[in-house]
């Protein structure tokens, strides 16, 4: 990527615009991300309410954000693989499967943390 020439506050504004475009694209094109966003609207406030201290609140809320982050990265991998070609290829399938596995692990981590904090 070439240097854009933007610096300082302009660079920050542009970066925020690109981030917003990415979030919008993920919401528009990815059903799983939409589902996770709607779940996060319940889980994030619940995490703040159910956590007893700052550490517990950070763990509960942080794992929700981690799932969203991993889902966006997985969707990015899938988009790049699909851009390259629609034909079946072992490496393309492996990349998509590993991205999906990362999301599953993030959701498992969220579940384990929530259970340990709320039960333990």
Image: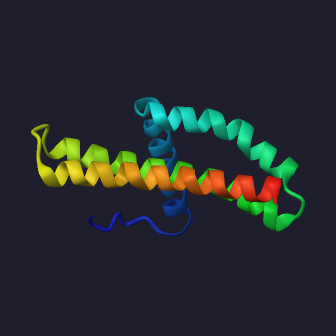
Residue occupying the far right of the picture: 52
In depth, the one of 46 and 115 nearer the eye is 115
Image quadrant holding the C terminus, namely bottom right
Is residue 60 among what the camera can see?
no
Going 78% across and 58% down the picture, which residue do you hit? 117
x and y, in percent, of residue 115 in the image: 73, 53
| Vertical comparison of 14 with 35: above or below | below
In depth, the one of 13 and 36 nearer the eye is 36
Q: How many marks?
A: 0
In depth, the one of 88 and 77 nearer the eye is 88
x and y, in percent, of residue 105 in the image: 49, 55
x and y, in percent, of residue 49 in the image: 87, 48
Going 53% across and 55% down the picture, which residue do you hit? 106
Q: Is residue 84 left or right of residue 30?
A: left
Q: Is residue 85 left or right of residue 73?
A: left
Going 72% across and 53% down the picture, which residue do you hit? 114
Going 63% across and 33% down the picture, which residue do you hit? 38
């Amino acid at each position: 990527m070439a240097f854009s020439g933007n610096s300082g506050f302009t660079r920050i504004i542009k970066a925020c615009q690109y981030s917003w475009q990415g979030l919008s694209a993920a919401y528009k094109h990815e059903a799983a991300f939409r589902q996770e966003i709607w779940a996060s609207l319940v889980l994030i406030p619940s995490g703040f309410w159910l956590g007893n201290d700052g550490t517990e609140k950070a763990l509960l809320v942080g794992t929700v954000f981690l799932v969203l982050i991993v889902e966006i990265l997985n969707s990015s991998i899938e988009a790049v693989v699909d851009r390259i070609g629609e034909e079946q290829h072992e490496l393309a399938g492996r990349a998509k499967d590993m991205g999906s596995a990362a999301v599953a692990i993030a959701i498992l981590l969220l579940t384990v943390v929530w259970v340990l904090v709320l039960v333990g």
